[in-house]
Amino acid sequence: MNNKGIGAIFCLISAVLMSARYIAAAIFMSNVVSWDSSLFQAGLSYVGSPLKAAAIIALIAGICFLVYGVVRDFKKQDK
């Protein structure tokens, strides 16, 4: 698999991790009668930050792989 494919997979992993964070907060808050943005922020704080940190790391790695793959392709075209 080339670097652009690996970068795309890392970006997909990042999106899945970020959505898992919000889904976990929504599941945690499922028994609440009324929804409020501050209440949902409290639910996100209960979920914690490891999912957010892992998503950011995966996104940075994905972008790096994508940029490296595109730069390599441009260098191949120039030769």
Image (cartoon, grey):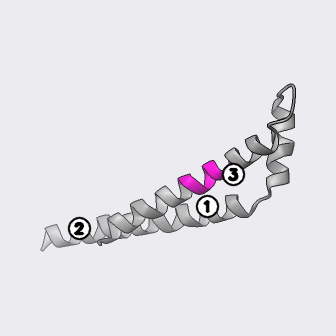
Q: Position of residue 47 (x, y in %)?
A: 79, 54
Q: Amino acid at mark 1?
A: Ile
> 62 or 72: nearer the eye?
62
Q: Residue 66's quadrant in the figure? A: bottom left
Q: Residues within 10 Å of mark 1 (few under 14, many from 20)?
A: some
Give the number of callouts.
3
Report the mark closest to the observer, 3 or 1: 3
Residue topped by disc 2: 73
Who's the residue at 61% across and 60% down the image? 55
Range of residues picked out in magenta: 15-21
Depth order, front residue of 57/16: 16
Q: Residue at x 80, y 58 (%)?
A: 48
Q: Residue furthest top?
A: 34
Instruction: Tell me how far mark 1 sits from mark 2, CA to CA.
Output: 26 Å
Viewer-side label of 1, 2: 1
Q: Secondary structure at mark 3?
A: helix
- The local crowd at label 3, few if under 14, some if 14 to 19, many if 20 or more residues have their Cα within 10 Å, is some
- The answer to whether 71 is drawn above or below residue 15 in the figure is below
Is residue 67 something that shows in the picture? no
Tag on residue 56?
1
